[in-house]
Amino acid sequence: MTTVGEPDRAASGGRRPWARAPGGAARWYRRDPLGFVEHAARERGPVFRLPDDESLCVADPAEALRVLQDEEGHYDEVSDFFHVRGGRLGPRETQVAIGRAARATLRTHLAAHRERLPAIVAELGEVSEWPSAGRAAAHRFLAGALLRPDSPPPLRELMAQVMQHDVLIRPNGRLARVTRRALWARVVRALAGEVLARRAGSRPGRPDLLDAILEATPPDTPATQLAQVYLLLFRTSVAPVGHVVAWTLLAAATHGVDLAAVPAESAVRESLRLWPVAWLLGRPVRRAHQVGGVRLEPGESVSVCAYLLHRDERHWPEATRFRPDRWDGPGPRGPYLPFGGGPFTCAGAVVARTLAADLVAAVTVGARLEVRGGRGRPHVAGIITPPPFQLRRTPCQA
Ligand code: HEM
């Protein structure tokens, strides 16, 4: 990569450097976003415009941290995470309280039920299809924390459909998108009804994620907003965790790493480096300023690219190799932002990483693993989903 603020990029305002790319840059980016940004960074350096929305992609470590820390208040201060229909759930203190409450619910569940993980992995069977098996395992484990078993059966049935139809990931194709939107709307209506019912009278028993959100928000918060935030948190607790486990298994098989011989935490950290599922972190510009020599105006946006930062050879030797051993000992290491950075850092980072590592250990311990497939391109829509692969897990004789 070249350095920030090269004269030609600054002179062109960083705009449309590949307008003449064969087939159109936007189409190329849509087809293969990761390949596109890798090419762009090689050709243009670590700050360039993305061809779909002209957002400024940032893959320079110092500039990326400056954007995420935002000490000068250049960006909108509300996290995209709480973007709900018709606005954003706020104020900021409420958002932070929701994040903390969700984290506490999952952490308590993980501490209380960790020993169930081997049985959950065994339920996947000797041959399982990934990455959906990863999402299914994360969901099965967290189910009781996400939605209380005594919730109304129609709501439980709808949430089961959310899992069955992979509503948690943005699908390709118009029909799939329409079906997904329709189910999403039905689930939001059902959840909003449940919010009203729970406000009218609390039930005894261990609180779930919805109770945690209710507890953390003022009582006049619209029920549909809470339902949407619940769904976002439900999705975040299941899909990225499942995908991190899937990426870890796939990367280990591709690079010939025996997962039984390395700490699961190191394998998960390394898989999040190579394949940061949340690969692009957007920030809407509120005040005019410059990033990497490019002037930005209010209304534009910046996208910090964790994927490129994590593969920068200047900071990560053998950057494209899956090497869990780089996490042995205290460091130093390169830029690492799988959970973002600054004031909007992921509220669930530790619990997500711990659950992913526990799941990887449960898959790995006492079994021989064989991966088939997984050679296609990742599906990139919001988060990075690994290409489909099959896992054969043969229990070893004790
Ligand atoms: C492997 C799993 C996960 C990954 C990779 C991940 C990644 C991220 C990233 C990158 C951000 C920052 C987005 C930005 O800066 O624009 C974020 C925010 C957030 N995440 Fe996670 N996340 C994961 C799991 C979870 C879980 C399990 C929870 C549940 C507690 C959670 C709750 C949140 C919340 C509440 C925010 C917004 C923080 C704020 O604005 O204050 N995440 N996540």
Image (tube, rainbow, N blue to C red):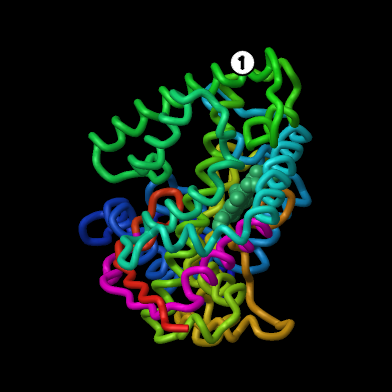
Instruction: Using the image as rendered, state which of residue 397 and residue 354 is in the foreground.
Output: 397
Q: Confirm if mark 1 falls within 8 A of ligand 1.
A: no
Task: Name the one closer to the observer, 19 or 58.
Answer: 58
Task: Give the vertical position of 128 relative to 393 (above or below).
Answer: above
Which kind of residue does numbered mark 1 sit on?
Ala
Residue 365 screen position, x and y as percent? 51, 76
Query: Can residue 288 be seen here?
Result: no
Side of 60 where 189 appears, left or right = left
**Which residue in the protein does label 1 denote?**
197
Task: Find the magenta span and give its range.
Answer: 349-378
Q: What element carries label 1?
A: helix
Q: How crowded is mark 1: few (under 14 residues within 10 Å), some or many (20 or more)?
A: few
Q: Image point 37% across, 28% down: which residue?
A: 183
- Res 63 → quadrant: bottom right
Q: Does the magenta stretch include residue 364?
A: yes
Query: Which residue is rendered at x = 48% and y = 78% of the image?
Result: 366
x, y percent for residue 130:
35, 61
Nearer the observer, 385 or 131 = 131
Count how many numbered circles sit on residues in the image.
Answer: 1
Point 33% across, 40% down: residue: 165
